[in-house]
Amino acid sequence: MLADLFNNPALMIMLVGALVGTASSLVGTLLVLRGTSMLSDAIGHSIVFGIVVVWLLTQQQSGPVQILGAALTGVLTVFLTELLVSTRRVKKDAAIGLVFPVLFSLGVLLLNLYARDVHIDTHTVLLGEIGFVWLDTVSLGDYRVPQSLITMGAMTLLNLAFITLFYKELKLATFDEALAKALGLAPGVLFYALLLLTSGTAVAAFDAVGAVLFVAFVIVPPSTAYLLTDRLWLIFVLGALVSIISSVTGYYLAVAWNVSIGGMMAVMTGVLLTLAFLLGPRYGLFAQWLRRRRQRRLNEVRTLAVHLYNHEDEPRQAMENVTHALREHLLWDTARARRVVARSCRNRLILCHGDVLELTESGRELAREILEPTR
Amino acid sequence: MMADMTALLTDYTLQSVIIGAVLLGLVSGVLGCFAVLRHQGLLGDTMSHAALPGVCLGFLIAGTRDIGIIMAGALFTGTLAALVILLLTRMSRLKTDAALGIVLSIFFAFGVVLLTYIQGQNNAAQGGLDAFLFGQAAAILRSDLWLMGGITAVALGLVAMLWKAFKLVSFDPEFAASLGFPVLVLDGVLTVMIALAVVVGLQMVGVVLMAAMVIAPAVAARQWTSRLETMVVLSAVIGMFGGVSGAVLSALKPGLATGPLIILSVSAVVVVSLALAPRRGMLWEAVSLWRGRRRLRYQHVLTTLYRLAVHHADPDYSSEQGMLDTYHGLGTRSALRKLQAKGQVEWRAVATGEPGPSHRWVLTPAGIREAERILDALGQEER
């Protein structure tokens, strides 16, 4: 029964995709919140060098030592970048853009030179081959299990363990680095541990999604979650959820249109981000628009109430407190004036006697509150 | 050997490659200066990755490898990427770095999807599309060069026309706004120009590494000068040098992608510049630091001798080598030798009647004057 599951390519591909997404978005959440998302771009590119060198040296790609070895290139990139920034000759953005292209270029050239000896080609470097992950299997007990599934599963657990164990410390180091330092939590060490895990995840995910699509899985799910909630733990959960949804939908769309599966999964994370950007409950564009509209309507009703209150019991009341007078006094066009009057009537703030408008007691109360807030 | 060289230089493909590399170096060197000064290096990275879907869309529209339409597509999606970044940072709570990463990866992923879609169509002409990933200089045609040259000319013409405004906006946008310059428009023009550089580099460097071609020449040039005029010219020269050397290397040995070779050549220039450039170079800084430290050490030893002489009210007061070493915590012999060579101290045989070494250090009149001058300069007095 279990063997059937492992022999189901579609399920394996979606599972690997979901694990890549979950493992990446776990570390990605902290990178995004720290404002250092682009480091994942640098790491994703430069591990290519590490992977090729490790392969040429050991002729093996998957083993903890191999992954660690290749992952060190990622940490090296960040270290070199910070070194370059510390010389005060290059700004941070330019330093990132200088270091990783060099390592990436070396990796690609080594691939060109030793093309026959290396298991990957330059195409895989960028696109990955998630469609073939079920072909490369290892024996686990009685079952043939895809290699990527084990590597990505281990990486996901490792990232999860790191975040659970150091949850409090990471939270503090992310939101208030100075306080974390003052309390002796060594945020610098935590940061480099995070980078090492990011690089390890990039190496583990490399065969499946390549160097660039990895960036999508690191940055986009956490950003989507960040648009939906303020709670840190919920960002982690929603990030994993986004990864799983985009993995499943991405797979089926890619099969339907006969396109790159990894690419389609990444595009789906983008689609979900767009949805969150537009429809998010609190920070979404639609929610912002609704909020603004409600505020505008409220302001109109209040303005009308104050206007009527000011002219109440005046001799010219019959001329001022009529719908068409609002045009000159409040510069509202007829349609707008009608809308506001209708809304105020519905809210029982005013009474309409034909054309003449009269405040109700609650409308009068509202106007008094505005005019004499401290009364 | 000479015949080989001549054959190389008259080689049709190689000529195209060199012309293409010169154009690329020129446009990315000049425009890169503004991108680097405005801290938009990573925007270049995003815009170049975002050119991939444009390349594929251009191919899909044209149905063939028509470089004009492909370039137009790349320019379109590159610019669109910049707009989406602006939208995300202005209209949501995402920060710039997240917006850059999102747009880079999603646009690229969409490009990958389109690329595999095109490959699934079994169109015979699609074989060349991979070249846009890492660059394939040898695949450049003469007709492509005309287009690249045209875009370069337009970009450089714009820079020349709007030179003053660009300069001001790059260094002090607030001041530029207060003078009534349309800062937003100029910002937009400069951003679109990065897309222009990316478009010129499509076939030479490819979309993945184009960012480095925008950043590296400008960073290297910045080390040698503090004037924008000089920096732009130098940056263009460095870009052309890197472009030509990388492109020629890749054309000589088939199978090597052009982009990585160009990037490595340019980056080598960056390393050299960071290390050797006068005043800003790190080697220069290390030497002057070392010199300063050594000079401080001579002066320290000299003033110690002077103070001892003052305290003992004896201008000929003699000090033992061992005592000076103990006082300064380190060997002072080399510093004293140097002072001796300058004629400021003497290694004199003294007969004091006390036990101890027969030779001791004594200040000369020149040494006393120098020590007084140093203490004066420091604003200290020893009475």
Image: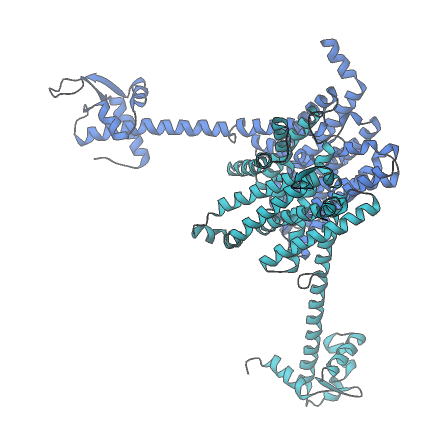
Chain colours: A cyan, B blue
Residue at 29% across, 33% down: B375
Residue at 80% across, 88% down: A354
Residue at 61% across, 44% down: A154
| Figure check: A221 above or below B352 | below
Instruction: Return the residue nearer the eye: A22 or A135.
Output: A135
Instruction: Return the residue nearer the eye: B243 or B161.
Output: B243
User: In the image, residue B270 lies at what x, y percent?
Assistant: 59, 29
Residue at 71% across, 9% down: B1
- The image quarter containing residue B221 is top right
Residue B182 visible to an observer of this rendering: no
User: In the image, residue A327 lies at what x, y percent?
Assistant: 77, 77
Q: Tell me how many marks there are.
A: 0
Instruction: Tell me if B115 is positioned left or right of B162 in this view.
Output: right
User: In the image, residue B104 lies at what x, y percent?
Assistant: 70, 44
Residue A219 visible to an observer of this rendering: yes
**Residue furthest left in the image:** B353
Instruction: Tell me if B140 is positioned left or right of A281 in this view.
Output: right
User: In the image, residue A331 lies at what x, y percent?
Assistant: 74, 74
- The image quarter containing residue B11 is top right
Instruction: Return the residue nearer the eye: A262 or B255.
Output: A262
Please state, as top left, top right, bottom left or bottom right, where the C terminus of chain A lies in the image: bottom right
